[in-house]
Image (tube, rainbow, N blue to C red):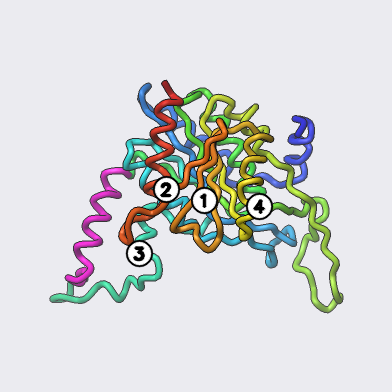
Amino acid sequence: MHFSEVDEFFSQIECPSNLDSSTKRVEEFVSSLETHDNVALVSSGGTTIPLEKRTVRYIDNFSAGTRGSASAEYLLGKGYKVIFLYREGSLRPYQRHFQGINFLDIVELAEEKVCVKREHLSKIRDIYKEYNSKKDQLLEVTFRSLADYLWLLRALSLELSPLESRVLLYLAAAVSDFYVPDTELPQHKIQSAEGARTLELKIVPKLLGPLVTRWVPKALVVSFKLETDPKILMDKAERALNTYGHSFVVANILETRRESVIIVCKDGVSVQITRNTNESEIEECIIEFLCKKHGIFVT
């Protein structure tokens, strides 16, 4: 993709309201790093495609953010400073452990004081201790739409670029392949009384190329490839590496993504990663592998 095409694409999508403030926060975060610190930018969650400027309806590329939020925790455990770029409302590090739990069901009144029920106390205490020890190493930035995500990804990558090989980009967000240019969006809610609508979606340019060659050219970049057909998975993962020239693709099949993945490497080697036990998370194994590779990459 030519750089002029990248600039043209960004001119067709609206930048998020939190772009300047988020960029400033990342700039301050980066300035606080020690010279030996490694930093990871983890993207997580799905992206929306608005169908109106004053958005009521949208197309959603859904992702709960399980892989990204878990991976961010394990990166923090490895000593990384982590910038977590996540979809508003998706899972977040540490908070993810309480997904689906009604807060009011885990507390009780004791002499007019609100207390955590005994059966939940150990879990909450352990997670709180871990969070409290790592929270200063974690910076969270939110996005909602595809446009938000791409603007923020570019801005944050450029802020990290001076750190060169100390940067690990872990691109686990589920990014839409389609979008509607701002100039083609109606101002107000689409009315059903006006009858059926034909919607033309434009293809989102592949920005992994500019990211690797222009935004963070010396970073270690990890992308993800999710498929439902095992027959095409490896071919698509290898093609991505050959096309964009980044370091790794984490290739996974929808039904088995929490049990097993294949990490396809730039040098042509493929490594299967399998979850160790019923108690572990596969993200722990993925991060263990990638951190070792990043250690070699930095040196």
Looking at the rendering, in which quadrant would you find the N terminus? top right
- Identity, as a three-letter code, of the amino acid under mark 2: Ser
Cα separation, mark 1 vs mark 4, equals 24 Å
Q: Badge 3, how many Cα within 10 Å: few under 14, some, many 20+?
A: few
Q: Which mark is residue 71?
A: 2
Residue nearest the viewer, comparing 75 with 261: 261
Q: Answer whether labels 1 and 4 touch (C-beta < 8 Å).
A: no
Q: Answer whether labels 1 and 3 touch (C-beta < 8 Å).
A: no
Q: Position of residue 110 (x, y in %)?
A: 15, 75
- Identity, as a three-letter code, of the amino acid under mark 3: Phe
Q: Which residues are magenta?
A: 115-134
Q: Residue placed at 51% from the left, 31% from the top? A: 220
Q: Answer whether labels 2 and 1 touch (C-beta < 8 Å).
A: yes
Identify the main secondary structure in magenta.
Answer: helix
Q: Earlier in the sequence, mark 4 or mark 2?
A: 2
Q: Earlier in the sequence, mark 3 or mark 2?
A: 2
Q: Residue placed at 37% from the left, 55% from the top? A: 281
Q: Residue furthest bottom?
A: 193
Q: Badge 1, how many Cα within 10 Å: few under 14, some, many 20+?
A: many
